[in-house]
Amino acid sequence: MKISVQREDFDIGAEMRALSRDPKVGAVASFAGVVREVPMTLEHYPGMTEREIGRIVEEARSRWQVMDCTVIHRYGELKPTDQIVLVVVASAHRGDAFAACEFIMDYLKTRAPFWKKEQTADGARWVEARASDDLAADRWTEKTEPRRGG
Amino acid sequence: MKVKLLFFAGLREQLGNAGEEIELPAGVTTLAGIHEHLRARGGNYEKVFSGRALVRMAVNQEMAQPTAQVRSGDEIAFFPPVTGG
């Protein structure tokens, strides 16, 4: 498992290849987030960010077969087309890899302490949290509810 | 009881304060208590801490509810809803 909160850019291909080396791995799913349209500055809570992502990854591992996982999130000043975040999940089969990757991304958006400040033509403004992100994360609670009793 | 306070993002800017160590008054033992103690400072603190729904809290780098107990030496963080990813 690799969790990195960094200023520097990352190489998606290299990160995916790094999770394909175990001969038991049959599926590597990834998600990359990219800055859209507006330059921004990303602030985070050093220490808590890494721990919170670690907790999210552990939760994913308890739900799906995750053989290895990489989460990279950048902070600092970013411009349109820059990469922001990368989640890569390796598993034996695609179902677990896809699901765990989406779960980690949904939870990261609602739990990891990052804040975006956009540099718009009218000046800088903090991005407001979106209710749709909370709903996306809530799906996973509903979905797995029946399993809790069993 | 002494605790470390941290403020992030829009909250930090509104308060003009990234963090401080404070001695809590006797009787202030929960996050809600600290929240109210800060609100009572008035000015920008009153503005920021009057709308509790918009302030998230963490104790020792873990998200926590207003009822959470705090202990001497704890790191208490206040911040807006997160917007990463």
Image (cartoon, coloured by chain):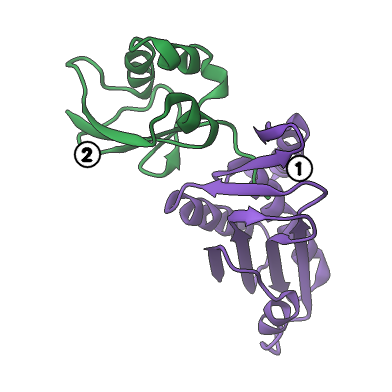
Quadrant in the rendering for residue A135: top right
Task: Give x and y (percent) for residue A49.
Answer: 50, 51
Instruction: Please name the residue shown 58% across and 53% down the image.
Output: A56
Instruction: Please name the residue shown 21% across and 22% down the image.
Output: B24
> Is A150 displayed left or right of A30 in the figure?
left
Task: Give x and y (percent) for residue A101.
Answer: 73, 60
Instruction: Please name the residue shown 51% across and 50% down the image.
Output: A52
Say if residue B82 shows up in the picture.
yes
Within 10 Å of the Cα at label 2, are there few (<14), some (14-19), or many (20+) other Cα atoms?
few
Instruction: Please name the residue shown 39% across and 22% down the image.
Output: B67
Give, as a three-letter code, the residue at label 1: Lys
From the image, state whether disc 2 or disc 1 is nearer to you: 2
Chain identifier, colour purple: A
Task: From this view, report whether residue A67 is shown above or below residue B18.
Answer: below
Q: Which residue is mark 2?
A: B73
Task: Give x and y (percent) for residue A74.
Answer: 61, 59
Chain identifier, colour green: B
Task: Give x and y (percent) for residue B9.
Answer: 52, 36
> Is B35 displayed left or right of A50 in the figure?
left
Q: Which residue is mark 1?
A: A143
State which chain disc 1 sits on: A
State which chain disc 2 sits on: B
> Gap in Å between the C-alphas at discs 2 and 1?
39 Å
Query: Camera-side residue: A43 or A33?
Result: A43
Quadrant in the rendering for residue A7: bottom right
Give, as a three-letter code, the residue at label 2: Gly
